[in-house]
Amino acid sequence: MTAGHVTGEEMVARAAGLVPMLREQQDDAERRGHYGPDVHEEFLRAGFYRMVQPRRYGGMELDLTTFLRTMVQIATGDPGTGWCLTLGSSHAWIVGSHLGEEAQAELFGEDGDFRAPHPAAPTGQAVPVDGGYRVTGRWPYASGSPYSTHALLGATVPQPNGGAPQLIIVVLPRSDYEVLDDWGAGRVMGLNSSGSNTIVATDVFVPQRLAITHTIFDPPMPTPGYLLHGNPMYLGRAPAPYHATLVLPVIGAARAALDEYASIVKVKPTNFTPFVPRYQFHEDQRVFGHATAQTDAAEMILYGFGDAYTATLRRAAETGRPVDPAQDPRWWAMLQQAGGLAASAVESLVHRTTSSGTGRGSRLQRYFHDVTMYRQHISSQQQDFAVRNGAFLLGAVDTWSLR
């Protein structure tokens, strides 16, 4: 398999074909904290890292929905591996959108080999110097970092007048940061194979060309990437796509949990009358049917968002009119619903399974822990977002902001 010109259906099929292997390596990946070198080589051959990278720089430049569908298949093999791969490969789209031609040519390089995490919190500091910044910081939860070639890192720039610091994103090559061995092996409740290690950089010079100084949440139009590539995807509006990359591993976990639950009830009998195989018992049928519906609905929401996002950016490119700022919170909240549905599917299957099916090291326990990590993520807090979104949509506040 190569990363050449292939269709979206072929990419989804490549991912689906790896599901058995990914399930077999779940234990090793969790102990290690990320998927192994053999899996990495398979991902390289399949072209998964290049899916949303510009074609001009060695990428496939496939659409967002195709990317989401492919990564759901990977997450069905192992949700943590899906999280790691997704967040290591998706940010090529940010570079392709928001940096200029010189920077993109430098970062993607002659062979187009590019993988970069983007931890959400701007926990670094960037001090302006001649030609750029000196950057120092420590960035936890850098999902996708073990196989990274670069990293996108948020930093604050102090203002000389004592005003609110400016937020920027800098791109560092792998030689300029350290990846700490602080993930996996049960250090966290779930997603132990997601490669969400901490990145550390100390007094690194970052040239101005490798810094994004505008917000990627509400970028100016047109972006440098759209002017360079002519693809509306590279208008690079980030809020909802960023949350979509967190939801898709949860949907993968739900698909995997359905498979595991079915394998259990096909061979185990009921504990009380009527004494029949559990797959013939109405309560197990009810739980499985409801969880299937929840998972199907979550997946339809995810792909429906991908299609709507693509159409909206295409329309913005054609008309020159920016995206309605009310669209971002509505998309995000819709995706939160998808994540909640998929997580609920896993939870209901686990609650129905007897303890013998959810012991330490079991796949259902792993999936339950993985979706709990999503539930705890700051960007998945539905009630908090509902208040913020409602205030904005009702006109009680003028702007929608995460801060």
Image (spheres, rainbow, N blue to C red):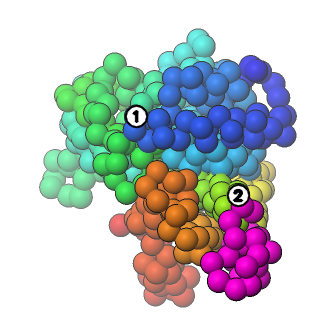
Q: Give the Cα separation between the discs numbered 2 and 1.
A: 27 Å
Q: Is residue 264 above or below residue 334?
A: above
Residue under the point 31% across and 23% down: 176
Is 277 one of the magenta-colored residues? yes
Q: Is residue 119 above or below residue 202?
A: below
Quarter in which the N terminus is drawn: top right
Identified by mark 1, the residue type is Arg
Q: Nearer the viewer, mark 2 or mark 1?
A: 2
- Could you classify mark 2 by the number of other residues whose Cα lies within 10 Å: few (under 14), some (14-19), or many (20 or more)? few
Residue 157 relative to residue 55: left or right: left
- Mark closer to the chain start, 2 or 1: 1
Residue under the point 25% across and 53% down: 165
Instruction: Determine the secondary structure under disc 1.
Output: helix
Check residue 318 in the rendering and tell me which mark sits there, or answer none.
none
Magenta span of residues: 266-295
- Could you classify mark 1 by the number of other residues whose Cα lies within 10 Å: few (under 14), some (14-19), or many (20 or more)? some
Say which quarter of the image contains residue 34.
top left
Say which quarter of the image contains residue 164.
bottom left
Q: Position of residue 227 (x, y in %)?
A: 66, 35
Q: Position of residue 348 (x, y in %)?
A: 59, 75
Q: Position of residue 362 (x, y in %)?
A: 51, 54
Residue under the point 60% across and 56% down: 253
**Residue underneath mark 2:** 263
**Residue underneath mark 1:** 32
Instruction: Determine the secondary structure under disc 2.
Output: helix
